[in-house]
Amino acid sequence: MELKLKDEDKLDKLYYDRDDDRLQDINSEYAENVELPMIKTTSTYTGPKEKGHAGFIIKLLIFALVVGGAAYLVFGVLLKGPKELMDCVNMDTAQLEDELGIKLTRNDDTYKRVRHYASGTLTSDGNGDIAVLYLDGKQLGIHIDSDDYKLFNIEIGDARYDAEDKMTYQKENTMQIMNDMYNGTSTSAFYYNTAKNDCIMVNYNDKTNRVVSMTYFNDLQKITQRLNFN
């Protein structure tokens, strides 16, 4: 036989109702939207981004500039060959200055190094590397002492046989004159063409047998007047 207190059923219902009310209060309290405080940060990360092509193109352009600069340095400066002057042989001082971007002044030392047999006064406008020659004030040709230039494909420092083999000047014949009959320091070879009445004189060092200077004359008869050249 189960014993119960008086009004025990009422008491159980009363406490049950109270507990249920408390649970509802608690649930409603935590179910409210509570605004949480903002968390401050110094990070600039905004999440993963899709990489575009702009960065790659910029890097590619920078690489191309570096490679281009290196190529110019190697091929445009370090490996730059001498300038061919066969189209400049009849230019006067002003024309040659404009063509080469140089300055030429009256230079008596140059014409003294030029072997010729002309009757008249030879003068030159030069800079130590190249000179324009004048005979009695008329342009006679050019003289070259520098390996920055070549003439009819002949370069300073070429071995004689190489120079004669690769020269583009259409020679008819050759005559040789030793510049110093006692010491034999150099020999001037005149490659000439009587039909064109011009010649190119190449000076070879007798010890090394290599080209040391070159001169073009546009009047063969004048520069050989004292040789009775026929």
Image (spheres, rainbow, N blue to C red):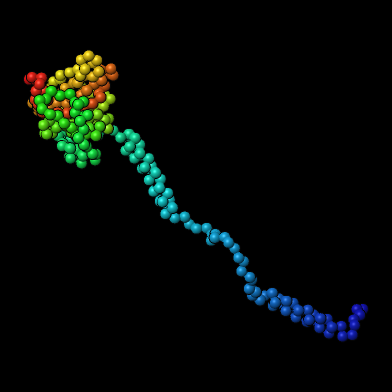
Give the camera-side residue of 26 and 189.
Answer: 189
Q: How many marks?
A: 0
Q: Residue at x 40, y 51 (%)?
A: 57
Residue 170 x/y as whole percent: 15, 26
Image: 160 above or below 55 = above
Work out which residue is located at the far top of the displayed protein and give it: 182
Q: Is residue 189 left or right of residue 148?
A: left
Image: 43 above or below 13 = above
Q: Is residue 193 left or right of residue 158?
A: left
Res 167 visible:
no
Q: Residue at x 21, y 17 (%)?
A: 180
Residue 168 x/y as whole percent: 18, 27
Give the camera-side residue of 105 and 88.
Answer: 105
Q: Residue at x 23, y 21 (%)?
A: 204
Among the 4 quarters of the image, the one containing residue 213: top left
Quarter of the image with the N terminus is bottom right
Residue 147 x/y as whole percent: 27, 30
Q: Residue at x 16, y 36 (%)?
A: 91
Give the camera-side residue of 51 and 3.
Answer: 51
Quarter of the image with the C terminus is top left
Res 81 visible:
yes
Q: Is residue 149 left or right of residue 54?
A: left
Among the 4 quarters of the image, the one containing residue 148: top left
Residue 43 x/y as whole percent: 57, 60
Among the 4 quarters of the image, the one containing residue 209: top left
Give the camera-side residue of 223 and 162.
Answer: 223
Q: Is residue 10 left or right of residue 230?
A: right
